Image (cartoon, grey):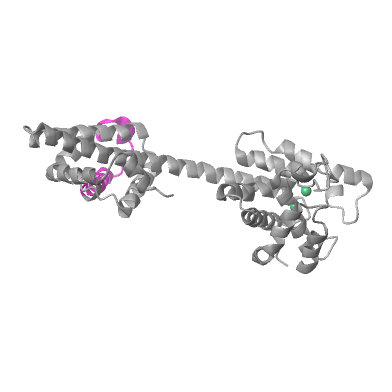
């Protein structure tokens, strides 16, 4: 994760003058840092939620030493540089790993603020202007540190949830693939080609990432197709084909109803990856741009990968033949502009084929 310090500093009004004031206040506070830490860690050991975190021998002392170092090196010097960002990142992650309750943790900043305030008050009893300047500056430094550590804490938590949902998504896609003739790598190749094609037509990075995540679910509806049809080596009869053609709708039903953009996209892809540009596809017979872009992209990458792959009923086609097929079907099966972009980036597509080739 990136902390983007350069965004935080102006937000808190920390300019060069403030940094000078922070240093001035820091010089007053630094000699008393032990007294500040006495108060902070005294409160921590008296608060049950935080006290239970520091049960291992020496753990509290180590945390206190690390925090003292952090204050002396950064908070009291105003050196909010890259190594400060890294140190704050590490501190936030340690707190997360130890399941430190954030509320008392934030409370310890308030205690520190009060202690620091008292030190400044004692050091500058007669010059109210200078005193306020120092207090104001050190408040900002402490606010910055508190804000960043909360941010890191939550970001770590959100990343874990994100990872989990990616994993669940991938396992649902694999479940769909598991019963099919295709190997697991089809969805990897297909989704990566979708990503390249989306990037090629200028979609932004978030959309591309979402498509790479959502497209592996295109055939999840095949879970609902009986084996005797799904795994039949020969051509399907008309009735069997009709059953097979239910898989987009089954996929649409399996993918949960959730407002997350990636889930909505996965649903749209499942429902529309067999639509055709000329309107002869299924299930809805949509045509042209009425087919969502992600469905049109998925259709090209899905078919291309199927053509160049080995399947029980066919040998892999040479790349030139598969490219020719796309070209011949531009404006019929496929969106012609997307076919053009795909063929322009054919070397990247071939690289994906090699990198994620099926084991022989
Ligand atoms: Fe499909
Ligand atoms: Fe597929």
Left/right of residue 143 with respect to residue 223 in the rendered view: left
Where 301 falls versus 109 (above or below)?
Answer: below
Q: Which of 153 and 80 is in front in this view?
A: 80
Check residue 239 for magenta coloring: no
Q: Position of residue 168 (x, y in %)?
A: 61, 44
Q: Can residue 180 be seen in this view?
A: yes
Where 178 falls versus 323 (above or below)?
Answer: above
Q: Is residue 311 visible?
A: no
Magenta portion: prevailing SS class: helix
Q: Where is residue 282 in the image (x, y as percent from the top left)?
A: 83, 43
Residue range corresponding to the magenta coloring: 44-72
* Quadrant of the frame with the C terminus: bottom right
Q: Where is residue 276 in the image (x, y as percent from the top left)?
A: 81, 48
Left/right of residue 273 with respect to residue 100 in the rendered view: right
Where 316 falls versus 285 (above or below)?
Answer: below
* Residue drawn at point x = 80 percent, y = 41 percent: 286
Quadrant of residue 305 within the rendered picture: bottom right
* Residue drawn at point x = 90 percent, y = 45 percent: 240
Check residue 49 for magenta coloring: yes
Quadrant of residue 48 within the rendered picture: top left
Q: Nearer the viewer, residue 1 or 52?
A: 1
Q: Position of residue 39 (x, y in %)?
A: 19, 35
Q: Nearer the viewer, residue 303 or 37?
A: 303
């Amino acid at each position: 994760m990136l902390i983007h310090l350069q965004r935080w500093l102006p937000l808190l009004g920390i300019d060069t003058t403030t940094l000078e004031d922070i240093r001035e206040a820091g010089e007053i506070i630094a000699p008393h840092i032990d007294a500040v830490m006495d108060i902070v860690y005294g409160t921590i050991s008296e608060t049950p939620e935080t006290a239970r975190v520091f049960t291992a021998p020496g753990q509290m002392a180590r945390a206190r030493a690390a925090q003292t170092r952090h204050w002396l090196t950064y908070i009291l010097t105003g050196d909010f540089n890259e190594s400060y960002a890294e140190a704050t990142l590490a501190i936030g992650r340690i707190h997360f790993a130890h399941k430190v309750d954030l509320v008392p943790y934030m409370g310890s900043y308030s205690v520190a603020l009060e202690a620091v305030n008292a030190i400044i008050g004692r050091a500058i009893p007669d010059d109210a202007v200078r005193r306020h300047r120092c207090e104001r500056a050190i408040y900002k430094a402490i606010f910055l540190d508190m804000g960043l550590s909360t941010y890191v804490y939550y970001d770590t938590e959100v990343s874990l949830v994100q990872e989990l949902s990616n994993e669940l998504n991938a396992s649902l896609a694999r479940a769909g693939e598991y019963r099919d003739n295709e190997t697991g790598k089809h969805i990897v190749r297909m989704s990566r080609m979708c990503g390249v094609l989306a990037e090629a037509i200028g979609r932004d990075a978030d959309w591309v990432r979402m498509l790479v995540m959502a497209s592996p679910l295109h055939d999840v509806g095949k879970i609902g197709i009986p084996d005797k049809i799904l795994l039949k080596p020969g051509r399907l009869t008309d009735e069997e084909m009709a059953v097979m053609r239910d898989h987009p709708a089954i996929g649409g039903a399996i993918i949960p109803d959730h407002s997350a953009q990636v889930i909505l996209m996965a649903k749209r892809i499942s429902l529309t990856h067999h639509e055709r540009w000329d309107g002869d596809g299924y299930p809805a017979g949509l045509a042209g741009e009425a087919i969502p872009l992600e469905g049109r992209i998925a259709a090209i990458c899905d078919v291309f990968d199927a053509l160049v792959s080995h399947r029980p009923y066919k040998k892999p086609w040479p790349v030139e033949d598969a490219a020719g097929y796309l070209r011949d079907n531009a404006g019929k099966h496929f969106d012609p502009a997307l076919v053009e972009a795909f063929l322009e980036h054919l070397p990247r597509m071939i690289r994906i084929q090699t990198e994620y080739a099926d084991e022989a």
